């Protein structure tokens, strides 16, 4: 009802308004379950924020670590090629952990790509609104 009244008043729902509405329903635990490796990346982009943002969806049967896991190089653990590039180029990587896989293996899998997209957008929107720039 609140969303309809807000939309009726202004006839257009801006990203800022949408973010404020959705932030009431989205918490940090939701973000951590969808993007479990994000906090471990330890990237600091400073006050200007990242230059670019990249959302990665794992292929069938894999987990988000496909994009974020470290690899052994010459006997030492190092960032994989994607994360090394992202660090160098100031790219923030959001690697999606789908329900039913990895640490979320006890959850039922998503029924459709549309459900995944809607959930990821809801969880990311408040975070993107907190940073400078256009979001992506």
Image (cartoon, grey):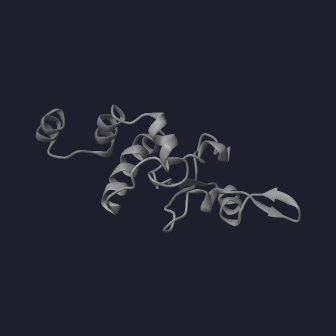
Q: Is residue 128 above or below residue 91?
A: above
Residue 123 on image: x %, y %: 41, 44
Q: Nearer the viewer, residue 37 or 12?
A: 37
Residue 31 on image: x %, y %: 48, 41
Horizontal side of residue 45 vs 6, given as left or right: right
In the rendered image, the residue lying farthest to the right is: 75
Identified at 46% across, 47% down, the residue is: 106
Q: Nearer the viewer, residue 2 or 118?
A: 118
Q: Is residue 12 above or below residue 73?
A: above
Horizontal side of residue 30 vs 88, given as left or right: left
Identified at 38% across, 36% down, the residue is: 26
Residue 43 on image: x %, y %: 66, 46
The image quarter in which residue 82 lies: bottom right
Residue 131 in view here: no
Identified at 71% across, 58% down, the residue is: 88
Identified at 55% across, 63% down, the residue is: 62
Count of numbered tags: 0
Residue 24 in view here: yes
The image quarter in which residue 85 lies: bottom right
Q: Looking at the rendering, in which quadrant would you find the N terminus?
A: top left
Q: Nearer the viewer, residue 38 or 58?
A: 58
Horizontal side of residue 51 vs 9, given as left or right: right
Q: Is residue 84 above or below residue 134?
A: below
């Amino acid at each position: 009802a609140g969303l309809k009244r807000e939309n009726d008043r202004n006839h257009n729902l801006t990203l800022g308004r949408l973010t404020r509405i959705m932030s009431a329903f989205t918490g940090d635990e939701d973000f951590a379950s969808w993007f479990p490796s994000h906090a471990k990346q330890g990237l600091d982009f400073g006050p200007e924020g990242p230059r670019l943002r990249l959302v990665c969806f794992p292929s069938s049967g894999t987990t988000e670590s496909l994009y974020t896991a470290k690899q052994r190089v010459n006997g030492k653990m190092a960032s994989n090629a994607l994360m090394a590039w992202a660090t160098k180029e100031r790219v923030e990587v959001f690697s999606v952990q789908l329900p039913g896989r990895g640490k979320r293996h006890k959850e039922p899998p998503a029924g459709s790509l549309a459900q995944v997209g809607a959930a990821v957008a809801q969880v990311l929107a408040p975070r993107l609104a907190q940073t400078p720039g256009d979001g992506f």
